[in-house]
Amino acid sequence: MHRFTFFSKLLRQGTTIVSEKEEGLASHKLLLQSGILSVSSPGTFVLSPIALRVVDKLIAFIDYKMSEVGGQKCLFPTLGRSQLWVRSGRWEKFGGEMFRLKDRVGRSLCLQPTHEEEACEFVSSLDIGNSVLPLRIYQISSKFRDEIKPRLGLLRCREFLMKDMYSFDLDVRAAEKTYDALSNVYSDIFRTLRLPVLRVAAEGGLMGDCHSHEFHCPLAVGEDTLSVCPSCNEAVLAANADSRMCPDCGLDRQTFKSVELAHCFLLGDKYTSNFNVKTTTQNGRKILQMGCYGIGVTRLLAAALEHFTASLVKENPPKELRWPSGFAPYSGAIALQKDNARDALSTDELNGVLAHFMELPSTSNSPTSGSTFFAGLLPRGDILVDDRSRLSLGRKLLDLRRLGVPWILIAKSRKGSVNSEYELVDVNRGGISFTASLNDVVAAFTRYDFQIPLPDICDHQYSRLWHENDTSR
């Protein structure tokens, strides 16, 4: 039964009262109310098993995209020696944002907010040859920054998950090719998630003076401001805009609040020269060129959730979560009639329905376009069975919609025939429901591009819209 998670066993306890400090994002408030996320301390959160399912899917997808460009995954220590940071000149530069501590003998350490120093120290120790270049190593790990005022849930917190890749190339031209390739991969990641992300030139900041670009998602609660041409769709940070007019077409730019989701830096030899990261060439030993590429995984989750929740749900404020297609915590749900109902499934009928989902493709299969197995994205327990015995179907549908489960199969008795048609609810299209075979249901649960064309629905394949107060069924 590894395909299924049973609602009655879910570890979730909703918070009925949410602090005003946590109400900046509608989706974050829903996460807290539904028990998907809980506050540990200001700027730190406990991710429930439901939240972790989404994070695991994002990580699996990012891992897949990194493997496409030759990325090799590793894991650097969170605890960093002060000597590394002094050597790069950033021990003092990071200031109060860095968590610092001392061990029992007085040695200075930090919770590393990024890992350029550690990556250089590691690669330098390998004494690599030309055959391994270009070298692209990355990790996905917890990072720590002592934010003065953590806010907006996972968008601005003190502990977060980040994917950071470090590239090492023989010369500047090769490093620029790597930079362009990885920037394009980042754009492809956001396109797959269907996020309207814009790439803008940016400053190096704490990385130093270097060529860099940020990837921004327009969001009303964002802390940055973009200036965007409505015709060319070219964007710049509003602080860096020379004028309101687009230099290419002459139209007035529009301004939008935004959230930074990723940042790419072409570092040159700033760090590699400090840490003596070299390779042997025909002309002797040569310092390597470096780049770094970060995506805030938990920030990406929060921004995508807010974007889709705000844009797909019509209520204001929204009362249901919406996730990127293919990245909901569960690909679909089976809502069972309560036990004492006349049309409740018998044990044999339930086993017959569940058996239809047991032969789904393995996550080890090659990913195919449109499939939620894309990059191995269907983990164990990805079908949620609402088996709460005393609740009506209406109440179950309400809870499942609030969780943002994209498809819901309403499982009622069909006189012992598992080949009968059932009612399938398309949550992302406003809760429209229609009759469907179990084969259609399997397709809906396993393909993020599956749709029943509404004009083709016959009169007997009725559609209706579920409303929040429709809990009597």
Image (cartoon, rainbow, N blue to C red):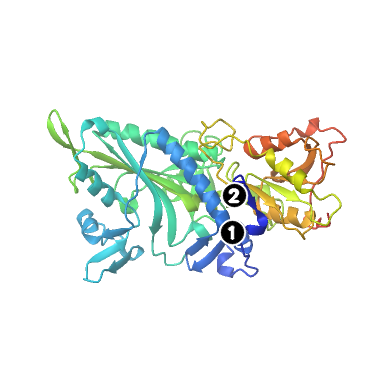
What secondary structure is marked by label 2?
loop
Q: Residue at x 50, y 58 (%)?
A: 154
**Can you tell which mark lies on residue 36?**
1
Q: Earlier in the sequence, mark 1 or mark 2?
A: 1
Q: Residue furthest top?
A: 282
What secondary structure is marked by label 1?
loop
Q: Is residue 448 something that shows in the picture?
A: no
Q: Are marks 1 and 2 in contact (CB under 8 Å)?
A: yes
Give the residue number, with chain letter if any, for mark 2.
329
Residues packed near mark 2 inside 10 Å, few (<14), some (14 to 19) or many (20 plus): many
Foreground residue, 391 or 161? Answer: 391
Foreground residue, 456 or 442? Answer: 442
Foreground residue, 218 or 67? Answer: 67
Q: Position of residue 178 (x, y in %)?
A: 34, 34
Left or right: where 202 falls relative to 393? left
Q: Residue furthest left?
A: 284
Q: Residue at x 38, y 61 (%)?
A: 145
Foreground residue, 437 or 230? Answer: 437
Left or right: where 260 falls relative to 311? left
Q: Position of residue 102 (x, y in %)?
A: 26, 69
Left or right: where 383 falls relative to 153? right
Q: Residue at x 79, y 48 (%)?
A: 345
**Can you tell which mark lies on residue 189?**
none
Tell me the distance, in whole angstroms, between the alpha carbons under discs 1 and 2: 10 Å
Q: Position of residue 144 (x, y in %)?
A: 39, 60
What's the amino acid at mark 2? Pro
What's the amino acid at mark 1? Ile
Image quadrant assignment for residue 149 = bottom left
Q: Residue furthest front?
A: 348
Q: Is residue 296 something that shows in the picture?
A: yes
Image quadrant assignment for residue 92 = bottom left
